Amino acid sequence: MSSGTPRLSKSRFVAGLQCRKRLWLEVHRRDLAEEPGPATQRIFDSGHEVGELAQREFPGGVLIDTPHYEVERAICETEEAVAAGATILFEPAFMYDNILVRVDVLKKNDDGTWDLIEVKSTTKASDTHVADAAVQKYVLEGSGFTVRSVSIMHLNRECRYPDLSNLFIIESVDDRVREMWPELQPRVGEFSHLLLHDSAPDVPIGKHCTAPYSCPFINHCWAAVKHPSIFTIPRINKKSIDTLIGQGVTGIVDVPDTFPLSENQRRYVDLFKEGHTQIMWPAIRDAFAELEYPLYFLDFETQADPIPRHDGLRPYDQFPFQYSLHILHQDGTLEHTEYLHPNTTDPRRPLMESLIRNTGETGSIVAYNAPFEQRVIKDLARIFPEHRRRLHRFLPRFWDLLVIFRSYYVDPAFGGSNSIKKVLPVLVPELSYAALEVQSGDIAQLAWKEMIGTSDEAKRAELERSLKEYCKLDTLAMVELYRVLEENIPA
Ligand code: SF4
Protein backbone atom coordinates (compact mmCIF):
# COMPACT_ATOMS: atom_id res chain seq x y z
CA MET A 1 0.00 0.00 0.00
CA SER A 2 1.09 3.59 -0.63
CA SER A 3 1.90 5.73 2.42
CA GLY A 4 0.24 8.97 3.60
CA THR A 5 -3.42 9.98 3.82
CA PRO A 6 -5.07 8.90 0.59
CA ARG A 7 -6.53 11.87 -1.22
CA LEU A 8 -9.50 12.00 -3.57
CA SER A 9 -9.48 13.88 -6.85
CA LYS A 10 -12.08 14.46 -9.52
CA SER A 11 -10.78 11.54 -11.60
CA ARG A 12 -10.64 9.27 -8.57
CA PHE A 13 -14.17 10.27 -7.64
CA VAL A 14 -15.37 9.37 -11.14
CA ALA A 15 -13.43 6.07 -10.92
CA GLY A 16 -15.26 5.36 -7.66
CA LEU A 17 -18.62 5.97 -9.29
CA GLN A 18 -17.76 3.32 -11.89
CA CYS A 19 -16.48 0.82 -9.31
CA ARG A 20 -15.41 1.14 -5.67
CA LYS A 21 -12.75 -1.48 -6.16
CA ARG A 22 -11.31 0.48 -9.07
CA LEU A 23 -11.01 3.55 -6.86
CA TRP A 24 -9.16 1.57 -4.18
CA LEU A 25 -6.82 0.00 -6.75
CA GLU A 26 -6.15 3.38 -8.41
CA VAL A 27 -4.89 4.71 -5.10
CA HIS A 28 -3.19 1.70 -3.52
CA ARG A 29 -2.25 -0.71 -6.33
CA ARG A 30 -1.64 1.42 -9.39
CA ASP A 31 1.05 -1.14 -10.32
CA LEU A 32 -1.73 -3.59 -11.27
CA ALA A 33 -3.13 -1.25 -13.93
CA GLU A 34 -2.58 -1.87 -17.60
CA GLU A 35 -0.63 0.72 -19.55
CA PRO A 36 -3.02 2.78 -21.70
CA GLY A 37 -3.49 1.19 -25.13
CA PRO A 38 -3.42 3.12 -28.41
CA ALA A 39 -7.14 3.95 -28.25
CA THR A 40 -6.81 5.38 -24.72
CA GLN A 41 -3.63 7.19 -25.68
CA ARG A 42 -5.47 8.80 -28.58
CA ILE A 43 -8.20 10.00 -26.20
CA PHE A 44 -5.56 11.55 -23.89
CA ASP A 45 -3.84 13.26 -26.83
CA SER A 46 -7.15 14.58 -28.14
CA GLY A 47 -8.02 15.86 -24.67
CA HIS A 48 -4.82 17.91 -24.50
CA GLU A 49 -5.26 19.31 -27.99
CA VAL A 50 -8.89 20.26 -27.37
CA GLY A 51 -8.06 21.68 -23.93
CA GLU A 52 -5.44 24.03 -25.38
CA LEU A 53 -7.81 25.20 -28.11
CA ALA A 54 -10.60 25.77 -25.58
CA GLN A 55 -8.35 28.08 -23.57
CA ARG A 56 -8.00 30.34 -26.61
CA GLU A 57 -11.73 31.06 -26.33
CA PHE A 58 -10.99 32.91 -23.08
CA PRO A 59 -8.41 35.58 -23.88
CA GLY A 60 -6.40 36.90 -20.98
CA GLY A 61 -6.75 33.76 -18.88
CA VAL A 62 -4.04 32.95 -16.35
CA LEU A 63 -2.67 29.41 -16.62
CA ILE A 64 -1.60 27.69 -13.40
CA ASP A 65 0.81 25.34 -15.08
CA THR A 66 2.35 23.76 -11.99
CA PRO A 67 2.76 19.99 -12.50
CA HIS A 68 0.02 17.81 -10.99
CA TYR A 69 2.37 16.34 -8.37
CA GLU A 70 3.26 19.76 -6.92
CA VAL A 71 -0.05 20.13 -5.16
CA GLU A 72 0.82 22.70 -2.51
CA ARG A 73 2.55 24.96 -5.03
CA ALA A 74 -0.41 24.77 -7.43
CA ILE A 75 -2.81 25.76 -4.65
CA CYS A 76 -0.52 28.58 -3.59
CA GLU A 77 -0.19 29.93 -7.14
CA THR A 78 -3.97 29.77 -7.54
CA GLU A 79 -4.50 31.78 -4.36
CA GLU A 80 -1.95 34.34 -5.52
CA ALA A 81 -3.60 34.68 -8.95
CA VAL A 82 -7.05 35.14 -7.41
CA ALA A 83 -5.69 37.66 -4.90
CA ALA A 84 -4.02 39.55 -7.76
CA GLY A 85 -7.44 39.98 -9.41
CA ALA A 86 -7.32 37.29 -12.16
CA THR A 87 -10.80 36.86 -13.57
CA ILE A 88 -10.12 33.88 -15.82
CA LEU A 89 -8.03 30.96 -14.61
CA PHE A 90 -6.97 27.80 -16.39
CA GLU A 91 -6.12 24.74 -14.28
CA PRO A 92 -6.45 26.47 -10.87
CA ALA A 93 -6.03 24.03 -7.96
CA PHE A 94 -8.28 23.75 -4.90
CA MET A 95 -8.48 21.38 -1.98
CA TYR A 96 -11.39 20.78 0.38
CA ASP A 97 -12.52 17.75 2.38
CA ASN A 98 -9.30 16.02 1.26
CA ILE A 99 -10.32 16.29 -2.42
CA LEU A 100 -7.94 17.97 -4.83
CA VAL A 101 -9.35 19.39 -8.07
CA ARG A 102 -7.87 21.27 -11.01
CA VAL A 103 -10.56 23.22 -12.84
CA ASP A 104 -10.30 23.53 -16.63
CA VAL A 105 -11.66 27.08 -16.80
CA LEU A 106 -12.83 29.29 -13.94
CA LYS A 107 -14.34 32.63 -14.82
CA LYS A 108 -15.24 35.43 -12.45
CA ASN A 109 -18.48 37.39 -12.85
CA ASP A 110 -18.99 41.07 -12.04
CA ASP A 111 -20.92 40.18 -8.88
CA GLY A 112 -17.96 38.20 -7.51
CA THR A 113 -19.46 34.77 -8.30
CA TRP A 114 -17.64 32.25 -10.51
CA ASP A 115 -18.55 30.14 -13.53
CA LEU A 116 -16.98 26.69 -13.62
CA ILE A 117 -16.33 25.21 -17.05
CA GLU A 118 -15.16 21.65 -17.60
CA VAL A 119 -13.69 21.04 -21.08
CA LYS A 120 -14.30 17.69 -22.76
CA SER A 121 -13.16 16.42 -26.15
CA THR A 122 -16.48 14.61 -26.66
CA THR A 123 -19.52 15.87 -28.56
CA LYS A 124 -21.91 15.75 -25.61
CA ALA A 125 -22.00 16.05 -21.84
CA SER A 126 -22.30 12.60 -20.26
CA ASP A 127 -23.42 11.83 -16.71
CA THR A 128 -19.79 11.07 -15.85
CA HIS A 129 -18.75 14.53 -17.04
CA VAL A 130 -21.48 16.08 -14.92
CA ALA A 131 -20.32 14.12 -11.85
CA ASP A 132 -16.77 15.29 -12.53
CA ALA A 133 -17.91 18.92 -12.66
CA ALA A 134 -20.17 18.54 -9.62
CA VAL A 135 -17.21 17.43 -7.48
CA GLN A 136 -15.34 20.54 -8.56
CA LYS A 137 -18.26 22.74 -7.54
CA TYR A 138 -18.34 20.94 -4.16
CA VAL A 139 -14.65 21.67 -3.59
CA LEU A 140 -14.86 25.27 -4.77
CA GLU A 141 -17.83 26.07 -2.58
CA GLY A 142 -16.15 24.35 0.33
CA SER A 143 -13.16 26.61 -0.34
CA GLY A 144 -15.31 29.72 -0.03
CA PHE A 145 -16.15 30.47 -3.68
CA THR A 146 -19.70 31.04 -4.87
CA VAL A 147 -20.23 29.03 -8.02
CA ARG A 148 -22.94 30.65 -10.14
CA SER A 149 -23.00 28.10 -12.93
CA VAL A 150 -21.45 24.81 -14.00
CA SER A 151 -21.01 24.01 -17.70
CA ILE A 152 -19.46 21.38 -19.89
CA MET A 153 -17.63 22.83 -22.87
CA HIS A 154 -17.63 20.17 -25.57
CA LEU A 155 -17.21 19.87 -29.32
CA ASN A 156 -20.03 20.81 -31.65
CA ARG A 157 -20.94 18.16 -34.24
CA GLU A 158 -22.47 20.88 -36.43
CA CYS A 159 -19.16 22.68 -36.86
CA ARG A 160 -17.56 22.07 -40.28
CA TYR A 161 -14.05 22.86 -41.39
CA PRO A 162 -12.87 25.43 -42.42
CA ASP A 163 -15.24 27.50 -40.24
CA LEU A 164 -14.20 26.58 -36.72
CA SER A 165 -15.87 29.59 -35.10
CA ASN A 166 -18.54 27.31 -33.63
CA LEU A 167 -16.21 24.44 -32.69
CA PHE A 168 -17.33 24.48 -29.04
CA ILE A 169 -20.66 24.41 -27.26
CA ILE A 170 -20.79 25.55 -23.65
CA GLU A 171 -23.67 23.54 -22.22
CA SER A 172 -25.08 24.44 -18.81
CA VAL A 173 -25.43 21.38 -16.58
CA ASP A 174 -26.74 23.21 -13.51
CA ASP A 175 -29.96 21.17 -13.42
CA ARG A 176 -28.08 17.89 -13.67
CA VAL A 177 -25.61 18.96 -10.97
CA ARG A 178 -28.55 19.92 -8.76
CA GLU A 179 -30.06 16.46 -9.22
CA MET A 180 -26.92 14.67 -8.08
CA TRP A 181 -26.06 17.15 -5.35
CA PRO A 182 -27.78 15.32 -2.42
CA GLU A 183 -25.74 12.19 -3.28
CA LEU A 184 -22.46 14.00 -3.51
CA GLN A 185 -21.39 14.52 0.09
CA PRO A 186 -22.36 10.97 1.21
CA ARG A 187 -20.35 9.61 -1.73
CA VAL A 188 -17.33 11.72 -0.82
CA GLY A 189 -17.55 10.37 2.73
CA GLU A 190 -17.96 6.79 1.52
CA PHE A 191 -15.02 7.00 -0.89
CA SER A 192 -12.72 8.69 1.62
CA HIS A 193 -13.52 6.01 4.18
CA LEU A 194 -12.98 3.24 1.63
CA LEU A 195 -9.48 4.47 0.91
CA LEU A 196 -8.50 3.99 4.56
CA HIS A 197 -9.09 0.24 4.29
CA ASP A 198 -6.05 -1.93 3.85
CA SER A 199 -7.63 -4.17 1.25
CA ALA A 200 -9.78 -3.64 -1.83
CA PRO A 201 -13.56 -3.95 -1.44
CA ASP A 202 -15.02 -7.15 -2.76
CA VAL A 203 -16.73 -6.10 -6.00
CA PRO A 204 -17.62 -8.79 -8.53
CA ILE A 205 -16.75 -8.19 -12.17
CA GLY A 206 -19.57 -7.23 -14.51
CA LYS A 207 -20.63 -4.98 -17.32
CA HIS A 208 -19.45 -1.99 -15.27
CA CYS A 209 -15.85 -3.09 -16.00
CA THR A 210 -16.16 -1.75 -19.53
CA ALA A 211 -18.67 1.10 -19.16
CA PRO A 212 -18.59 4.05 -19.12
CA TYR A 213 -14.84 3.41 -19.46
CA SER A 214 -12.76 0.31 -19.94
CA CYS A 215 -11.23 -0.26 -16.52
CA PRO A 216 -7.41 -0.47 -16.43
CA PHE A 217 -7.60 -3.32 -13.89
CA ILE A 218 -9.43 -5.78 -16.13
CA ASN A 219 -6.35 -7.98 -16.51
CA HIS A 220 -6.12 -8.21 -12.74
CA CYS A 221 -9.80 -8.74 -11.88
CA TRP A 222 -10.63 -10.92 -14.88
CA ALA A 223 -7.64 -13.25 -14.50
CA ALA A 224 -9.89 -16.15 -13.50
CA VAL A 225 -12.51 -15.54 -16.20
CA LYS A 226 -12.96 -18.61 -18.39
CA HIS A 227 -12.81 -18.07 -22.15
CA PRO A 228 -14.88 -17.84 -24.19
CA SER A 229 -16.68 -15.88 -21.53
CA ILE A 230 -20.34 -15.18 -20.85
CA PHE A 231 -19.64 -11.57 -21.90
CA THR A 232 -19.56 -12.72 -25.54
CA ILE A 233 -23.14 -14.08 -25.44
CA PRO A 234 -25.06 -11.92 -27.95
CA ARG A 235 -27.13 -9.15 -26.36
CA ILE A 236 -26.83 -10.54 -22.85
CA ASN A 237 -28.06 -8.00 -20.31
CA LYS A 238 -26.47 -6.79 -17.10
CA LYS A 239 -28.94 -8.66 -14.89
CA SER A 240 -28.13 -12.02 -16.50
CA ILE A 241 -24.39 -11.33 -16.30
CA ASP A 242 -24.65 -10.39 -12.62
CA THR A 243 -26.73 -13.49 -11.86
CA LEU A 244 -24.29 -15.82 -13.61
CA ILE A 245 -21.29 -14.23 -11.90
CA GLY A 246 -23.14 -14.52 -8.59
CA GLN A 247 -23.34 -18.25 -9.30
CA GLY A 248 -19.60 -18.36 -10.02
CA VAL A 249 -20.11 -18.81 -13.78
CA THR A 250 -17.81 -16.87 -16.11
CA GLY A 251 -17.28 -19.34 -18.98
CA ILE A 252 -19.92 -20.14 -21.57
CA VAL A 253 -19.48 -23.87 -21.08
CA ASP A 254 -20.59 -23.53 -17.46
CA VAL A 255 -23.88 -21.73 -18.15
CA PRO A 256 -26.59 -23.98 -16.64
CA ASP A 257 -29.01 -25.55 -19.14
CA THR A 258 -31.89 -24.11 -17.13
CA PHE A 259 -30.59 -20.53 -17.19
CA PRO A 260 -33.11 -18.26 -18.98
CA LEU A 261 -31.73 -17.14 -22.36
CA SER A 262 -33.26 -16.12 -25.67
CA GLU A 263 -33.41 -18.73 -28.42
CA ASN A 264 -30.48 -17.13 -30.21
CA GLN A 265 -28.42 -16.92 -27.02
CA ARG A 266 -29.17 -20.56 -26.15
CA ARG A 267 -28.10 -21.69 -29.63
CA TYR A 268 -24.84 -19.78 -29.17
CA VAL A 269 -24.19 -21.25 -25.71
CA ASP A 270 -24.98 -24.80 -26.89
CA LEU A 271 -22.48 -24.44 -29.71
CA PHE A 272 -19.68 -23.99 -27.21
CA LYS A 273 -20.98 -26.59 -24.80
CA GLU A 274 -21.14 -29.19 -27.54
CA GLY A 275 -17.81 -27.99 -28.97
CA HIS A 276 -19.02 -28.32 -32.54
CA THR A 277 -18.39 -26.01 -35.45
CA GLN A 278 -21.68 -24.84 -36.88
CA ILE A 279 -21.51 -24.43 -40.66
CA MET A 280 -24.56 -23.72 -42.77
CA TRP A 281 -23.17 -24.69 -46.17
CA PRO A 282 -26.40 -24.14 -48.16
CA ALA A 283 -26.58 -20.54 -46.94
CA ILE A 284 -22.87 -20.03 -47.69
CA ARG A 285 -23.35 -21.51 -51.17
CA ASP A 286 -26.27 -19.12 -51.80
CA ALA A 287 -24.21 -16.16 -50.63
CA PHE A 288 -21.27 -17.17 -52.85
CA ALA A 289 -23.62 -17.46 -55.83
CA GLU A 290 -24.14 -13.68 -55.60
CA LEU A 291 -20.45 -12.99 -56.27
CA GLU A 292 -19.32 -11.73 -59.64
CA TYR A 293 -15.70 -11.84 -60.88
CA PRO A 294 -13.33 -10.13 -60.71
CA LEU A 295 -13.51 -9.93 -56.94
CA TYR A 296 -12.20 -6.70 -55.41
CA PHE A 297 -11.20 -7.26 -51.77
CA LEU A 298 -11.20 -3.78 -50.26
CA ASP A 299 -10.21 -2.35 -46.89
CA PHE A 300 -9.93 1.29 -45.80
CA GLU A 301 -8.00 2.74 -42.89
CA THR A 302 -9.60 5.90 -41.58
CA GLN A 303 -8.87 8.70 -39.18
CA ALA A 304 -11.33 10.71 -37.05
CA ASP A 305 -9.94 13.87 -35.51
CA PRO A 306 -11.68 15.80 -32.73
CA ILE A 307 -10.63 19.03 -34.44
CA PRO A 308 -11.43 18.74 -38.15
CA ARG A 309 -8.66 19.73 -40.56
CA HIS A 310 -10.09 19.14 -44.01
CA ASP A 311 -12.96 20.73 -45.92
CA GLY A 312 -16.47 19.74 -44.90
CA LEU A 313 -15.39 17.55 -41.99
CA ARG A 314 -17.03 17.84 -38.55
CA PRO A 315 -15.46 16.79 -35.22
CA TYR A 316 -14.85 13.02 -35.31
CA ASP A 317 -15.96 12.62 -38.92
CA GLN A 318 -14.02 9.72 -40.34
CA PHE A 319 -11.98 10.15 -43.49
CA PRO A 320 -9.86 7.55 -45.29
CA PHE A 321 -6.10 7.88 -45.58
CA GLN A 322 -5.26 4.42 -46.90
CA TYR A 323 -6.75 1.51 -48.76
CA SER A 324 -5.62 -1.92 -49.86
CA LEU A 325 -7.19 -3.75 -52.78
CA HIS A 326 -6.60 -7.34 -53.83
CA ILE A 327 -8.17 -8.27 -57.17
CA LEU A 328 -8.93 -11.94 -57.70
CA HIS A 329 -9.70 -12.95 -61.28
CA GLN A 330 -11.74 -15.96 -62.29
CA ASP A 331 -8.62 -17.76 -63.54
CA GLY A 332 -7.15 -17.52 -60.03
CA THR A 333 -4.65 -14.73 -60.69
CA LEU A 334 -4.32 -12.23 -57.88
CA GLU A 335 -3.25 -8.59 -58.16
CA HIS A 336 -2.61 -6.10 -55.41
CA THR A 337 -2.83 -2.32 -55.40
CA GLU A 338 -2.97 0.25 -52.63
CA TYR A 339 -2.90 3.90 -51.65
CA LEU A 340 -1.35 5.47 -48.57
CA HIS A 341 -1.53 9.22 -48.26
CA PRO A 342 2.01 10.56 -47.73
CA ASN A 343 1.57 13.94 -46.02
CA THR A 344 -0.67 16.29 -44.02
CA THR A 345 -2.77 17.44 -46.98
CA ASP A 346 -6.33 16.20 -47.51
CA PRO A 347 -6.04 12.52 -48.53
CA ARG A 348 -9.57 12.12 -49.87
CA ARG A 349 -9.29 13.27 -53.47
CA PRO A 350 -6.10 11.40 -54.44
CA LEU A 351 -7.32 8.31 -52.59
CA MET A 352 -10.69 8.45 -54.33
CA GLU A 353 -9.11 8.96 -57.78
CA SER A 354 -6.82 6.01 -57.20
CA LEU A 355 -9.74 3.87 -56.04
CA ILE A 356 -11.83 4.78 -59.08
CA ARG A 357 -8.93 3.90 -61.39
CA ASN A 358 -8.42 0.52 -59.75
CA THR A 359 -11.90 -0.75 -58.97
CA GLY A 360 -13.31 -1.22 -62.48
CA GLU A 361 -16.93 -1.05 -63.54
CA THR A 362 -17.99 -4.61 -62.79
CA GLY A 363 -17.21 -7.30 -60.26
CA SER A 364 -18.09 -7.70 -56.59
CA ILE A 365 -16.39 -5.57 -53.95
CA VAL A 366 -15.74 -7.78 -50.94
CA ALA A 367 -15.30 -6.19 -47.53
CA TYR A 368 -15.31 -7.42 -43.95
CA ASN A 369 -18.13 -5.39 -42.40
CA ALA A 370 -19.16 -3.78 -45.69
CA PRO A 371 -21.35 -0.98 -44.19
CA PHE A 372 -18.14 0.65 -42.97
CA GLU A 373 -16.52 0.71 -46.44
CA GLN A 374 -19.85 1.77 -47.99
CA ARG A 375 -20.09 4.67 -45.57
CA VAL A 376 -16.62 5.85 -46.55
CA ILE A 377 -17.65 5.71 -50.23
CA LYS A 378 -20.87 7.64 -49.53
CA ASP A 379 -18.91 10.34 -47.68
CA LEU A 380 -16.52 10.66 -50.62
CA ALA A 381 -19.51 10.95 -52.97
CA ARG A 382 -20.93 13.76 -50.86
CA ILE A 383 -17.68 15.70 -50.82
CA PHE A 384 -16.95 15.22 -54.55
CA PRO A 385 -20.30 15.62 -56.32
CA GLU A 386 -18.62 15.42 -59.73
CA HIS A 387 -17.80 11.77 -58.93
CA ARG A 388 -21.03 10.99 -57.09
CA ARG A 389 -22.60 8.81 -59.75
CA ARG A 390 -19.43 6.83 -60.30
CA LEU A 391 -18.94 6.26 -56.57
CA HIS A 392 -22.59 5.39 -55.99
CA ARG A 393 -22.28 2.65 -58.58
CA PHE A 394 -19.84 0.95 -56.19
CA LEU A 395 -22.43 0.57 -53.47
CA PRO A 396 -24.60 -2.29 -54.83
CA ARG A 397 -21.43 -4.19 -55.77
CA PHE A 398 -20.49 -4.71 -52.11
CA TRP A 399 -20.56 -8.20 -50.63
CA ASP A 400 -19.92 -8.72 -46.92
CA LEU A 401 -17.65 -11.58 -45.84
CA LEU A 402 -18.42 -10.82 -42.19
CA VAL A 403 -22.02 -11.97 -42.74
CA ILE A 404 -20.70 -15.50 -43.33
CA PHE A 405 -18.88 -15.57 -40.00
CA ARG A 406 -21.64 -13.80 -38.15
CA SER A 407 -24.46 -16.07 -39.29
CA TYR A 408 -23.35 -19.18 -41.17
CA TYR A 409 -19.96 -20.28 -39.90
CA VAL A 410 -19.31 -20.28 -36.16
CA ASP A 411 -16.39 -22.16 -34.67
CA PRO A 412 -15.80 -22.35 -30.90
CA ALA A 413 -12.12 -21.75 -31.73
CA PHE A 414 -13.04 -18.16 -32.74
CA GLY A 415 -13.50 -17.57 -29.00
CA GLY A 416 -16.93 -16.02 -29.34
CA SER A 417 -15.73 -13.38 -31.81
CA ASN A 418 -16.22 -12.93 -35.54
CA SER A 419 -13.38 -10.45 -35.92
CA ILE A 420 -11.15 -11.29 -38.89
CA LYS A 421 -8.21 -11.40 -36.47
CA LYS A 422 -9.85 -14.29 -34.58
CA VAL A 423 -11.21 -16.12 -37.63
CA LEU A 424 -8.03 -15.99 -39.73
CA PRO A 425 -5.66 -18.03 -37.52
CA VAL A 426 -8.25 -20.82 -37.24
CA LEU A 427 -8.99 -21.18 -40.95
CA VAL A 428 -5.69 -19.95 -42.42
CA PRO A 429 -3.06 -20.66 -39.73
CA GLU A 430 -0.15 -19.78 -42.05
CA LEU A 431 -1.30 -16.13 -42.15
CA SER A 432 -1.05 -14.05 -38.99
CA TYR A 433 -1.13 -10.49 -37.70
CA ALA A 434 1.11 -11.45 -34.77
CA ALA A 435 4.43 -10.51 -36.38
CA LEU A 436 3.25 -7.11 -37.66
CA GLU A 437 4.23 -3.85 -35.97
CA VAL A 438 0.83 -2.37 -36.79
CA GLN A 439 -1.78 -4.85 -35.60
CA SER A 440 -5.01 -2.88 -35.34
CA GLY A 441 -6.86 0.06 -36.81
CA ASP A 442 -6.15 2.11 -33.67
CA ILE A 443 -2.42 1.58 -34.03
CA ALA A 444 -2.67 2.33 -37.77
CA GLN A 445 -4.20 5.73 -36.97
CA LEU A 446 -1.40 6.59 -34.56
CA ALA A 447 1.23 5.31 -37.00
CA TRP A 448 -0.15 7.38 -39.87
CA LYS A 449 -0.21 10.55 -37.76
CA GLU A 450 3.38 9.91 -36.78
CA MET A 451 4.37 9.10 -40.36
CA ILE A 452 3.01 12.34 -41.82
CA GLY A 453 4.38 14.41 -38.95
CA THR A 454 7.96 13.18 -38.73
CA SER A 455 10.95 14.69 -40.48
CA ASP A 456 13.03 11.57 -39.75
CA GLU A 457 13.14 9.87 -43.15
CA ALA A 458 14.14 6.46 -41.80
CA LYS A 459 11.31 6.51 -39.29
CA ARG A 460 8.91 7.62 -41.95
CA ALA A 461 9.94 4.79 -44.30
CA GLU A 462 9.56 2.26 -41.49
CA LEU A 463 6.06 3.50 -40.61
CA GLU A 464 5.04 3.51 -44.26
CA ARG A 465 6.18 -0.08 -44.66
CA SER A 466 4.34 -1.17 -41.47
CA LEU A 467 1.11 0.54 -42.51
CA LYS A 468 1.20 -0.99 -45.98
CA GLU A 469 1.91 -4.45 -44.56
CA TYR A 470 -1.00 -4.21 -42.15
CA CYS A 471 -3.63 -3.01 -44.61
CA LYS A 472 -2.41 -5.48 -47.25
CA LEU A 473 -2.81 -8.34 -44.79
CA ASP A 474 -6.41 -7.27 -44.10
CA THR A 475 -7.36 -7.79 -47.74
CA LEU A 476 -5.13 -10.84 -48.25
CA ALA A 477 -6.82 -12.40 -45.21
CA MET A 478 -10.19 -11.93 -46.92
CA VAL A 479 -8.87 -13.51 -50.12
CA GLU A 480 -7.60 -16.57 -48.24
CA LEU A 481 -10.77 -16.94 -46.17
CA TYR A 482 -12.77 -16.73 -49.37
CA ARG A 483 -10.59 -19.43 -50.96
CA VAL A 484 -10.87 -21.78 -47.97
CA LEU A 485 -14.65 -21.47 -47.95
CA GLU A 486 -14.95 -21.84 -51.69
CA GLU A 487 -12.79 -24.99 -51.72
CA ASN A 488 -14.88 -26.56 -48.97
CA ILE A 489 -18.41 -25.81 -50.14
CA PRO A 490 -19.92 -29.26 -50.66
CA ALA A 491 -20.90 -29.96 -54.27
S1 SF4 B 1 -12.11 -4.68 -13.51
FE1 SF4 B 1 -14.22 -4.40 -12.89
S2 SF4 B 1 -14.35 -5.13 -10.80
FE2 SF4 B 1 -12.18 -4.82 -11.26
S3 SF4 B 1 -11.76 -2.78 -10.54
FE3 SF4 B 1 -12.26 -2.61 -12.68
S4 SF4 B 1 -14.44 -2.17 -12.75
FE4 SF4 B 1 -13.98 -2.94 -10.70
Image (cartoon, rainbow, N blue to C red):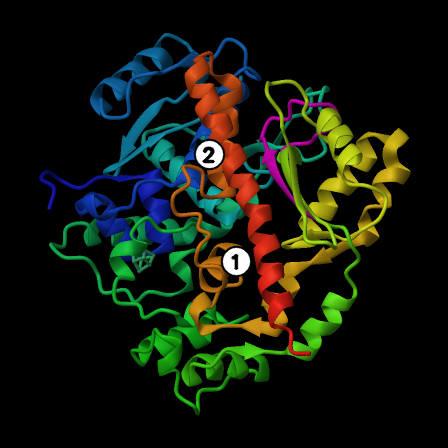
Under mark 2, the amino acid is: Arg
Under mark 1, the amino acid is: Ser
| Percent position of residue 117, x then y | 50, 29
**SS at mark 1 in the image:** loop
At horizontal 79% and vertical 33% (from top left) the residue drawn is 357
Which of the two labelled residues, at mark 2 and mark 1, occupies the earlier sequence position?
2
Bounds of the magenta span?
296-315
Asked if residue 233 lies left or right of residue 339, the reply is left
**SS at mark 2 in the image:** helix
| Percent position of residue 215, x then y | 36, 51
Q: Nearer the viewer, residue 486 or 23?
A: 486
How many residues crowd around disc 1 within 10 Å: few (fewer than 14), some, or many (20 or more)? some
At horizontal 36% and vertical 7% (from top left) the residue drawn is 84
Residue 98 lies in the magenta-colored region: no
At horizontal 51% and vertical 78% (from top left) the residue drawn is 268
Q: Where on the image, by quarter, is ligand 1?
A: bottom left
Residue picked out by circle 2:
42
Point out the image quarter for the C terminus: bottom right
Query: In this orientation, does residue 111 appear?
Result: no
Residue picked out by circle 1:
419
Q: Nearer the viewer, residue 359 or 273?
A: 359
| Percent position of residue 350, x then y | 73, 25
| Residue 5: quarter of image | top left
Dots 2, 1 in contact, CB < 8 A: no
Which residue extends farthest bottom?
A: 258
Judge depth for marks 2 and 1 and give the one in front: 1
- Image vertical order of residue 381 relative to residue 363, above or below: above
Tag count: 2
